[in-house]
Image: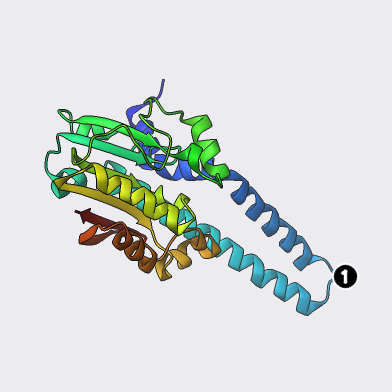
Amino acid sequence: MTSSNEIGIQSRFSGLSRVILFNWPLYVAALLVVVGLFVISILPSVDTLVSKIAMLILVAVLLQTFASLIASHWVYDLSPLRDWSWLAKAVGEPQRIVLVHAGYDETGGKLAKIFPSSEIQTVDFYAALERREPSIIRAQKFFPSKTVPISSSLTNWPVPNDSVDLVLVAFAAHEVRDHEKRVVLFQEMRRILAGNGHVMLVEHLRDRANFIAYGIGAFHFLSNADWVSCTEAANLLLQTQFKITPFVRVYELCR
């Protein structure tokens, strides 16, 4: 039987464990690189300069790997993104919600608990992506969605105009790599948004903090300028923005 203390430990690291589970080939590769460099550095036949360079690279790989793990634990286990309850303070009590994701629901199904009286529909545009990340494929395998999406496309969702109080798109919109297609996605969000509704965009950014945490992996994210350009092109107004940890920014958009 699992003790309550063990359950607490598991829950405190559940976000980090999912990050590792979804991206395990990268961490295995880092481990193999570290082992290989260590072997090179201690071989007596290897030149001293080569040995020192190998050790320096080894240390850099270790530091980068630990930095990414610490940042992921901070974001997904120690910040308000763990339970998403901050949404209620930001948007009040929306009657109709559309959750938009790219194959994996980052909220973990918590919206129904946060907004028990709201009507919640899901759009999963994973099938419309030209490039599909292996990490998302693994996420779908281990945590298949329990909700049937109303649409799997970037546009033409079966939702009336001006009818939704909250559109939430978290850690998903950057998977649409083409700028024009991202604009189309946000135009569709604007179409369904009620006059006093909100689009909440949650994303890592291609910025200094994420480069420190994730190294070249930060190139997978978009810059603040990219998001501003995209939302302006979709005729959405930036009402406010704020950070949740140094690594994640939330954009509150409206019509």
Say which residue appears at 46% left-offset and 62% top-offset.
Answer: 213
98 relative to 63 in the view: left or right: left
Amino acid at pointer 1 = Ser
The x, y position of residue 83, in whole percent, is 27, 41
Say which residue appears at 39% left-offset and 65% top-offset.
Answer: 226
Vertical position of residue 232 compared to residue 138: above or below: below
Foreground residue among 225 and 128: 128
Quadrant of the frame with the N terminus:
top left
Q: Write down the residue under mark 1.
A: 45
Foreground residue among 243 and 150: 150
The x, y position of residue 194, in whole percent, is 16, 43
Which quadrant would residue 101 be assigned to in this image? top left
Whether residue 79 is visible to the viewer of this picture, yes or no, is: no
Whether residue 63 is visible to the viewer of this picture, yes or no, is: yes
Foreground residue among 113 and 158: 158
Vertical position of residue 225 compared to residue 27: above or below: below
Say which residue appears at 65% left-offset and 65% top-offset.
Answer: 58
User: Which structural element holds mark 1?
Assistant: loop
How packed mark 1 is, by other alpha carbons closer than 10 Å (few <14, some 14-19, many 20 or more), is: few
Which residue lies most toward the right here? 45
